[in-house]
Image (cartoon, rainbow, N blue to C red):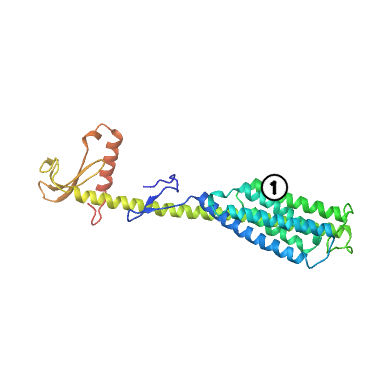
Amino acid sequence: AISEHTSVSNASLGPSGTALSITTLHDTLQLQDLDRTKSFLKLAVVVALIMLALMAAVGGQLWVKVLFGAGMLAVITACSALLWQLRSQVAYRLSRVLVVGYICVFGAFTGIGFFGVFSPAVVVIPFGLYFFGMASSFRGTLTVYLSVSIGYAALTLAVVFGLTPDLGLITAPSISKLEAIVVLACVEVMFFATYVIARLSRRATEFALNQHDRAVRAVAGRDALLHEARMDLDEVLRARGLGRFTDEVVGNYQLGHILGRGGMGEVYDAIHVDSEDHAAVKLLHAHYLEDKDIERRFWRECRTASSLDVPNVV
């Protein structure tokens, strides 16, 4: 039988007696994180390769272009190396993913610097934010979000207030500083919304898997109990025969064959000595006679059984 507190990682017996393997919630989430990480790494490599190809077709400041190319090469190298390590599931570590994440953040900012702080290159940030927001560590994901949010705000404000020249391919010279700040605020709101949605999605996934885990545990418990009941029934059928008190008269009943044996006692087929009505008589094991709790349970069982008047219930 499986209690409510049994670890789900243990194997349980199914109705046929075979082992029913159940993985833990942690293992399931880790497998999901592993699959999601592999997908992200592959897509990041593809995006970085496309950016390198597009960079060759456009102009721009040479040193900014070189920095952007170095950032994309760093992303490709880091993602490919982690993909190679993740061929084995045991190699998955959140710390490794976060290191690659910061390299991707660096690559994203080199792209924003190359294309411009108000260019479509900014859309790559929510893509990465959602992935890292789905990770297990709240502190790690919050650190990534704050790094991206603060970094983009600092870079944009530096450009808006003239602290650094805007060397991007796409500039916005026609908008005022106030309008630029409003645009920055809108982008920051989108960053925050993406991060919050990712964390809520993580929580919803954990809740759904936990509910599924409980359902599987309940099914496994019922299967184990059913298997145990079948084993008990087989034991009862094998136990049918003569007992120590067969042919003895107990109270008003003459005991016959044993119907079954259990942990508390034995059940005999019996006949009332006067009316010759058939009955089932349960005798408590002698070594339980000094246990008052067992005795009270026995009498409670008797009262409950005697209060029933239902066909097919002895």
Whether residue 50 sits left or right of residue 200 in the image: it is: right
Q: Nearer the viewer, residue 135 or 74?
A: 74
Whether residue 147 sits left or right of residue 19 in the image: it is: right
* SS type, badge 1: helix
Q: Residue at x 56, y 49 (%)?
A: 91
x and y percent of residue 172 in the render?
Answer: 86, 63
- Within 10 Å of disc 1 (Cα), the crowding (few <14, some 14-19, many 20+) is some
Q: Amino acid at mark 1?
A: Thr
Identify the residue position indicated by label 1 in the image.
Answer: 143
x and y percent of residue 208 in the render?
Answer: 53, 56
Residue 137 in view of the camera: no
The number of numbered discs placed on residues in the rendered structure image is: 1
Q: Nearer the viewer, residue 6 or 29?
A: 29
Whether residue 44 sits left or right of residue 213 in the image: it is: right
Q: Residue at x 34, y 50 (%)?
A: 225
Q: Nearer the viewer, residue 115 or 23?
A: 115
Residue 58 in view of the camera: yes
x and y percent of residue 7 in the render?
Answer: 45, 45
